[in-house]
Image (tube, rainbow, N blue to C red):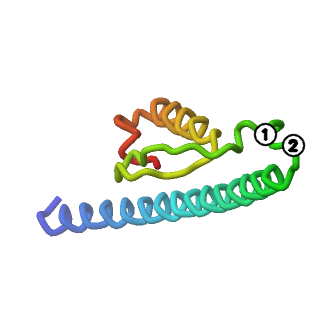
Amino acid sequence: MSETEALRAENEALRQRIEELEIELAEALHEADLDACHVAGLTAQIKALIAEGDACPNRAAHPLLARETYTHAQTGETVTKTRAFPLYREAFDAEAARLGIESPEQFRA
């Protein structure tokens, strides 16, 4: 095989790899979009549940909706969240550990 033929073969192999990577990227972006949609749906549900609990005259029946002060993991600022916020942090950290993400606190609120 001549040097020109070898370069053409290498070029073709690289083009095929680029096509494969473009397909993989498109699939990954689609999955990320679906994850964003899922997060939007869950966020809407959570906001509705919080609003419903806040409207309930029996506040004692909703202890996780009481507001507490927490420290934002990324900024160090004080934030006010419901008492359910630690559930978010625990679930976030557990999923991060499962995925092999170290120091998840630098990525979560």
- Quarter-wise, where is residue 31 in the image? bottom right
**Count the marks: how many?**
2
Image height of 41 relative to 71, above or below: below
At 24% from the left edge and 61% from the top edge, which residue is drawn? Answer: 10
Q: Position of residue 35 (x, y in %)?
A: 61, 56
Q: CA distance from mark 2 to mark 1?
A: 8 Å
The quarter of the rendered structure image containing the N terminus is bottom left
User: What is the residue that sits farthest to the left in this orientation?
Assistant: 3
Q: Amino acid at mark 1?
A: His
Q: Amino acid at mark 2?
A: Asn
Q: Position of residue 22 (x, y in %)?
A: 44, 65
Q: Position of residue 48 (x, y in %)?
A: 78, 58
Pointer 2 with pointer 1, Cβ within 8 A: yes
Of the pair 57 and 20, the residue shown nearer to us: 57
Closer to the eye: label 2 or 1: 2
In the displayed structure, does residue 52 sit left or right of residue 14? Answer: right
At 56% from the left edge and 36% from the top edge, which residue is drawn? Answer: 86
Of the pair 3 and 45, the residue shown nearer to us: 45
At 78% from the left edge and 53% from the top edge, which residue is drawn? Answer: 54
Is label 2 in a helix, a strand or a loop? loop
Q: Which residue is mark 2?
A: 58
Q: Which residue is mark 1?
A: 62
Of the pair 14 and 22, the residue shown nearer to us: 22
Image height of 23 relative to 93, above or below: below
Image height of 25 relative to 83, above or below: below
Q: Which mark is residue 18?
A: none
In the displayed structure, does residue 14 sit left or right of residue 61? Answer: left
